[in-house]
């Protein structure tokens, strides 16, 4: 494979994974943008989605992509409940409270899953595997399908936020809680629904992860950090930005993995972290001018 | 009783604090737009203007809590717009805040002692017991501000007016050359306002301290200031003695609308 | 009624004599261990007193190797929580990645003691004795702290926390990838030493020194400045305090101490690899214990660690697999309902105030004369 083919392959890999990254982090960034809560359990929810898929796949023989139909609603419900029971109590408190509470929640979830399913790495099998080949360049089918699914989901979210009444309520609540309340929007209901939607997104991302690599109960933290890194680039609740940011990260990771030979896949987290630190240090006053500066949720 | 200068304060030589073309942008909006001002040593100068005219923003820029987007600031002849807040404090500039900020969980005395950082108390010195002189000075200042009985009280437990006084004390602690007071008289009962007025006058007269005051209370301004600047929508609207400014048509229009 | 009990407990455990007594007892503990050893070698022709004493020791084994190990672990937890509190409680910067310094210290010490699997590891950096190697581990952690602190301490609240979490995870992977350093999947082995009393003493003395150091720091103006930074960083900076310098100093001290503990722990463990040296759970331990005890106080981390350790050993020992789930939930409960921790129950004032309100009875006379230490409101 000559250099240009290698480069193209790397770029393709980066772009493909970018879609997954985007869906993965939207759940995190929308919660932050709408409710001002930084959810450190995000990666653990991702893990739960992945395990849900795995159970459906291995114990009930479901095709993972089909399992989306069950995982997303289930995660929605989980999110809705979590918000009502727990997150509601931390919304208007200082960020530290949200960090610690979600951190504890994540730990509890990760260890619960470990208890039930052990720490052995798991993986799901999908019938959409294999790859298409064009000369020396391969297009992995699973990853392509993942990207397609991700795009569909993101378009759906975009339309939801922009065109539906619910979406408008969410955006109103994000911009100004009090004003929204005065106009008759039930903030609590909106928050619960939003959290549910975000977890559904995250669950979908978990499903998408499950056939691509091994999943373990403790995988969450690395993904939370990745979500944070992309959010730093994309802005809170910014969907097109998420896609671009996700792809950027994917490209960087793949380029490094291909052209810096001594390193394995573990470089992934280091590069996203490095990106994160660079972004944060370059703008120490906070992302995009303020923590709870809910940019337009487009 | 006003300060000792003419309306333009020229007689005192070089300005202690001077801003030239100070500009500060928030998003697309100019919170400050090419503001020029100067304060001469020993003066008590007022800074007034309707709400949102940029007064506190100016203070933020001067004390380096915010960066300038344009223009320059000179303090004692040195350009300070790139310095860190603590460096400017070391040079001799103190300020208070509109919403008073004291260290609520520490006592009044501790608050005072932690504010004496002027001549760069080094890290090593901080590991040794506090020099009694500093403690004495802190107590003395607290007495000066009628807060003696609250020396060991947690700052968060003080009343609003007392916290305001404490903040002024903290600003005075490092023996600064210029003190920026942001609405020192707001939200305080008249008795305390008189105390503050007296003290400011005393400090100006006896120690030649320079003051720049943001105020809404025109009586306060009239009592103390020899000169006043007026800001409106981030721009300097007028400058002059309190009497001149109060009768200035533009100023009246700004406050009450045309 | 409850208040009376609380006050009584408070006056006991914060009493200087009581604490010194406890320390002396702890210092004497290993003697029972040695006595048991001595008993085993005893001839049968000894006095009945000695015999029954030895029977008791051998039968009941009140202080055997496991007990010493257990206490050692607790001392280590106390030190770690106290260190974390220096940055998290006093300065107000909640560090979710503090365990990275532990790992750096562990690896530093191991490598300096000669565990490197890399042929080209420089000889002068090998074969050090334990003490210098432990100090070396601390230095490694401190140097890294200065570097990373300069970057991350500029960030506000949650950004700092997450950046440090990222640091931990990234460092773990970075070290893992560099198998020259990390030993890859095999990890690193340290010289084997099985001497429980040794580690017991080392950790006990370290704990006493560290807690004393932190207590002392709290009484200095430096400590008060950290609290001022926590309360109002912008105001402090504006009043002439070089906040960056202070923050980095506290951060580095905490890191160095944690690094040294990591080194000691590595030696005791005789084996480390990236997963156990850079274990995320250690951070949650530190956070939770400090919060349970009372963040920002001197005694908080000590109390919190002791309580959690007791809980683990006694209560949750039967539910070994569940303890981390419990602790995650415990953290949530503490943060939501008892944010001041146990110290908050003891004291009338909030955590972190005029310090001598924290530990009554420690006060020096000068405290009441208005040094920055202030005086308790009595």
Image: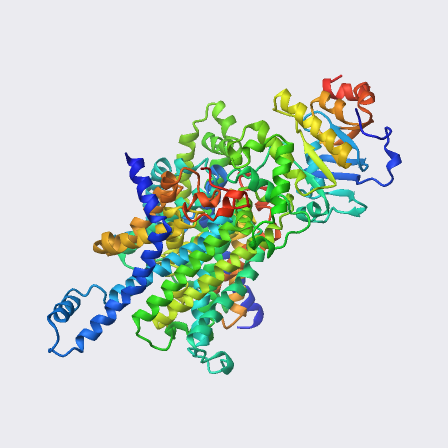
Front-lying residue, C44 or B4: C44
Quarter the C terminus of chain B occupies? top right
Left or right: B71 with respect to A105?
Answer: right
How many numbered discs, if any? 0
Residue A295 in view here? no
Return the x and y of residue C130 as percentages of the image width and height: 42, 74
Quarter the N terminus of chain B occupies? top right
Report the residue that reaches farthest toward the right.
B11
Return the x and y of residue C216 as percentages of the image width and height: 48, 54
Front-lying residue, C322 or A112: C322
Q: Identify the image quadrant of residue A187.
A: top left
Residue C84 in view here? yes
Left or right: C77 with respect to A166?
Answer: left
Return the x and y of residue C220 as percentages of the image width and height: 53, 51
Return the x and y of residue B157 as percentages of the image width and height: 50, 32
- Residue appearing at x 34%, y 68% in the figure: C199
């Amino acid at each position: 494979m000559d250099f240009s083919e290698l480069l193209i392959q790397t770029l393709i890999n980066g772009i493909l994974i970018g879609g997954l990254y985007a869906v993965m982090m939207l759940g995190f960034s929308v919660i932050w943008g709408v409710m001002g809560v930084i959810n450190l359990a995000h990666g653990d929810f991702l893990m739960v989605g992945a395990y849900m898929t795995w159970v459906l796949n291995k114990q009930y023989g479901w095709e993972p992509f089909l399992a989306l139909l069950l995982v997303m609603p289930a995660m929605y419900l989980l999110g809705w409940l979590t918000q009502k029971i727990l997150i509601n109590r931390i919304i208007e408190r200082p960020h530290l409270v949200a960090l610690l509470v979600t951190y504890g929640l994540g730990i509890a979830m990760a260890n619960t899953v470990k208890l039930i399913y052990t720490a052995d790495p798991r993986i799901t099998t999908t019938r959409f595997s294999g790859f298409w080949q064009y000369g020396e360049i391969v297009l992995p089918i699973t990853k392509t399908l993942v990207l397609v699914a991700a795009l569909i989901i993101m378009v759906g979210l975009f339309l939801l936020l922009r065109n539906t009444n619910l979406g408008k309520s969410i955006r109103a609540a994000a911009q100004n809680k009090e004003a929204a309340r005065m106009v008759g929007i039930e903030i609590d209901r909106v928050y619960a629904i939003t959290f549910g939607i975000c977890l559904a997104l995250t669950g979908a991302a978990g499903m998408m992860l499950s056939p691509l690599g091994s999943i373990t109960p403790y995988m969450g933290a690395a993904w939370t950090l990745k979500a944070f890194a992309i959010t730093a680039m994309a802005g809170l609740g910014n969907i097109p930005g998420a896609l671009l940011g996700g792809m950027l990260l994917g490209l960087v990771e793949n380029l490094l993995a291909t052209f810096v030979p001594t390193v394995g896949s573990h470089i992934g987290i280091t590069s996203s972290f490095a990106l994160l630190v660079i972004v944060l240090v370059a703008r120490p006053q906070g992302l995009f001018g303020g923590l709870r500066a809910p940019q337009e949720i487009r | 009783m006003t300060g000792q200068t003419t309306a333009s304060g020229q007689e005192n030589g070089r300005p202690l604090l001077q801003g030239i073309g100070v500009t500060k942008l928030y998003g697309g909006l100019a919170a400050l737009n090419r503001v020029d001002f100067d304060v001469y040593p020993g003066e008590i100068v007022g800074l007034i203007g309707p709400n949102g005219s940029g007064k506190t923003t100016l203070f933020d820029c001067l004390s380096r809590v915010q960066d300038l987007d344009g223009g320059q600031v000179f303090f004692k002849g040195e350009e300070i717009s790139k310095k860190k807040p603590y460096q400017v404090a070391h040079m001799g500039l103190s300020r208070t805040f509109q919403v008073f900020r004291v260290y609520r969980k520490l006592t009044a005395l501790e608050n005072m002692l932690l504010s004496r950082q002027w001549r760069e108390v080094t890290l090593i010195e901080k590991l040794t017991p506090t020099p009694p002189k500093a403690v004495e000075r802190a107590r003395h200042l607290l007495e000066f501000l009628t807060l003696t009985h609250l020396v060991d009280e947690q700052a968060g437990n003080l009343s609003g007016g007392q916290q305001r006084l404490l903040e002024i004390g903290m600003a005075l602690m490092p023996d600064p050359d210029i003190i920026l007071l942001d609405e020192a008289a707001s939200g305080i009962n008249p008795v305390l306002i008189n105390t503050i007025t007296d003290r400011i006058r005393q400090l100006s007269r006896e120690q030649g301290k320079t003051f720049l005051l943001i105020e809404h209370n025109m009586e306060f301004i009239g009592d103390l200031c020899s000169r006043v600047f007026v800001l409106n929508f981030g721009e300097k609207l007028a400058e002059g003695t309190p009497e001149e400014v109060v009768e200035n048509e533009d100023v009246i229009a700004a406050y009450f609308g045309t | 009624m409850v208040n009376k009990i609380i006050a009584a407990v408070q006056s006991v455990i914060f009493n200087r004599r009581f604490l010194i007594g406890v320390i002396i007892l702890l210092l004497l503990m290993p003697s029972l261990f040695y006595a048991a050893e001595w008993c085993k070698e005893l001839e049968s022709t000894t006095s009945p007193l000695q015999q029954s004493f030895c029977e008791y020791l051998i039968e009941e084994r009140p202080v055997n190797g496991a007990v010493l190990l257990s206490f050692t672990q607790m001392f280590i937890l106390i030190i770690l929580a106290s260190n974390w509190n220096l940055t998290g409680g006093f300065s107000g910067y909640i560090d979710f990645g503090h365990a990275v310094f532990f790992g750096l210290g562990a690896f530093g010490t191991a490598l300096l003691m000669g565990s490197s699997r890399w042929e080209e590891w420089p000889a002068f950096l090998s074969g050090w004795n334990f003490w210098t190697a432990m100090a070396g581990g601390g230095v490694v952690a401190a140097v890294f702290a200065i570097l990373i602190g300069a970057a991350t301490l500029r960030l506000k609240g949650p950004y700092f926390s997450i950046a440090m979490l990222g640091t931990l995870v990234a460092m773990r992977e970075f070290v893992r990838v560099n198998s020259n350093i990390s030993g890859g999947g095999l990890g690193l082995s340290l010289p084997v030493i099985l001497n429980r009393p040794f580690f017991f003493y080392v950790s006990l003395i370290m704990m006493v020194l560290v807690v004393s150091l932190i207590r002392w720091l709290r009484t200095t103006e430096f400590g008060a400045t950290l609290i001022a930074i926590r309360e109002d960083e912008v105001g402090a900076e504006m009043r002439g305090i070089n906040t960056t310098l202070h923050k980095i100093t506290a951060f580095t001290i905490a890191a160095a101490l944690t690094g040294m503990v990591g080194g000691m722990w590595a030696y005791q463990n005789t084996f480390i690899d990236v997963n156990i040296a850079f274990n995320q759970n250690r951070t949650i331990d530190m956070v939770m214990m400090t919060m349970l005890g009372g963040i920002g106080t001197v005694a908080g981390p000590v109390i919190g660690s002791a309580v959690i350790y007791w809980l683990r050993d006694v209560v949750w020992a039967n539910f070994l697999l569940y303890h981390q789930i419990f602790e995650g939930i415990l953290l949530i409960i503490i943060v939501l309902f008892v944010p001041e921790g146990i110290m908050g129950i003891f004291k009338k004032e909030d955590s972190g105030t005029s310090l001598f309100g924290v530990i009554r009875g420690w006060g020096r006379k000068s405290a009441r004369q208005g040094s920055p230490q202030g005086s308790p409101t009595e």
